[in-house]
Image (cartoon, grey):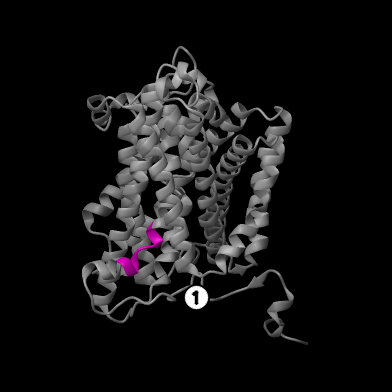
Amino acid sequence: MQDSTSVNPKHHLVQKTEDDLSLSDVNGSIEVPENGSFWRKLLAFSGPGALVAVGYMDPGNWVTSVAGGAQYRYTLLSVVLISSLIAMMLQYMAGKLGIVKQEDLAQATRDRTNKVGGFVLWIMTELALIATDIAEVIGGAIALHLLFGWSMIASVLTTAFDVILLLLLMKFGFRKIEAIVMTLIITILVIFAYLVILSTPQLSALFGGYLPQLQTLSSHTPIGGGDSQLTLTLGIIGATVMPHNLYLHSSISQTRKVDRSNKSELKEAVRFMTWDSNIQLSLAFVINSLLLILGAALFFGHADKVGTFGSMYNALKDNSIAGAIASPILSTLFAVALLASGQNSTITGTLTGEIVMEGFLHLRIPMWLRRVVTRGLALIPVVAFTLIYGGSEGKLDDLMVQSQVFLSIALPFTMAPLIYFTSSKKIMGEEFANPKWIATLGWIVFAVLTYLNVQLVVQQLMGS
């Protein structure tokens, strides 16, 4: 009788793998200089942070941020700031786990939980990936609809073919992918900086919006309709602090070649990873702020007229809403940025799917098949909404906002293992375990988010 391990794995699409290396094809593939200036070493370590930052400015952020500005002006800027600081702390933990333990978060979780616990966390993570993909599908489809005039259902179905683009990009090598992603991020940044400069926001009110206010946690629905501040607050957190990014960063932080037997080299790798991550997340913070500022400066008082991507697109060329700066050029730039955001998120979402599948289940499937399955599951609700509601953008945007709220609900299930692992001296060692103040802060953030999520679920079940 032939032993199952002797079967040639090439005959099977789904392969059992016990490979200890996360994303083994690129793990440790990028050389870093042993000597050189701070800037030369930072350049060598720069890249993973850009892929992580993509998740913090995907189309899901656009709806919640612009809607938050249009409805509550600059008040929710404080939520954008706090979310970004939370993201920096969590991504530091995730990147450090990858570098020090040479494990991604999925591997670390599966190896340290029982079968049932690991399965539950895998299901939550897969649902979070689908929720993320829903936002990408909707954003990309609406961008195609606005730019080329295609029907909504045709645009939605076209997004299924982005797997071809991704597979082509993967042939260029990981460093090239990082460069392409960074170029798209800069494109989005430049477009929104330009739009905000033209909108001439009120600077005193703008900077005042970064001061935390308790009213951002209000669950009362406004008289004129729309979402409560709590719903938008959790939507912004869910759209900003993305659960899948923690898995992604813990893996791609390992793409740099580091001698793990040398503690000083490990410390240096962690330091430069943190610099890279925080610089790129600062860019994401600026872009998310620009989105909310744009909503506040141009659309405040017209929240009912900018509830969808299409209405935002039309508002940017409508003098009665956007004022004297309105023009078709601004609308086109908005749609181009939206398309760039969706395609950027596609790259990182697919990589994360592979990391999660291998880490939790020890299964490896071809990237194209993984992408087809994930995108197929995301397409089902989007196609259903498109057909049932006749291509209504408003219903699709509602679906997107709810997907972002779900991400906020899923976040604690990812945060808890990450904080626990990176705070444990037994797992990380004395030198690399989180300092007590970071561990304490992490658990406080976990407790607050969990409480707010429970409150949101109760609010929605009660129909208030």
Nearest the eye: 329 or 378: 329
Position of residue 366 measured from the top left corner of the image (x, y, whole percent): 65, 67
Residue 144, picture quadrant: top right
Stretch of the chain drawn in magenta: 43-49
Question: Which quarter of the rendering shows the N terminus?
Answer: bottom right
Nearest the eye: 333 or 45: 333
- In this figure, which residue is indicated by the disc labeled 1? 20
Position of residue 132 measured from the top left corner of the image (x, y, whole percent): 54, 46
271 with respect to 12 (left or right): left
Amino acid type, mark 1: Asp
Residue 305 against residue 129 in the figure, above or below: above
Element type where label 1 sits in the image: loop
Residue 134, picture quadrant: top right
Residue 280 against residue 381 in the figure, above or below: below
Count of numbered circles on the image:
1
Position of residue 339 measured from the top left corner of the image (x, y, whole percent): 54, 44
Does the rendering let one see residue 109?
Answer: no
Identified at 54% across, 38% down, the residue is: 403
Residue 195 against residue 132 in the figure, above or below: above
Packing grade of label 1 (10 A; few <14, some 14-19, many >=20) is some
Position of residue 136 measured from the top left corner of the image (x, y, whole percent): 56, 45
Identified at 67% across, 44% down, the residue is: 379
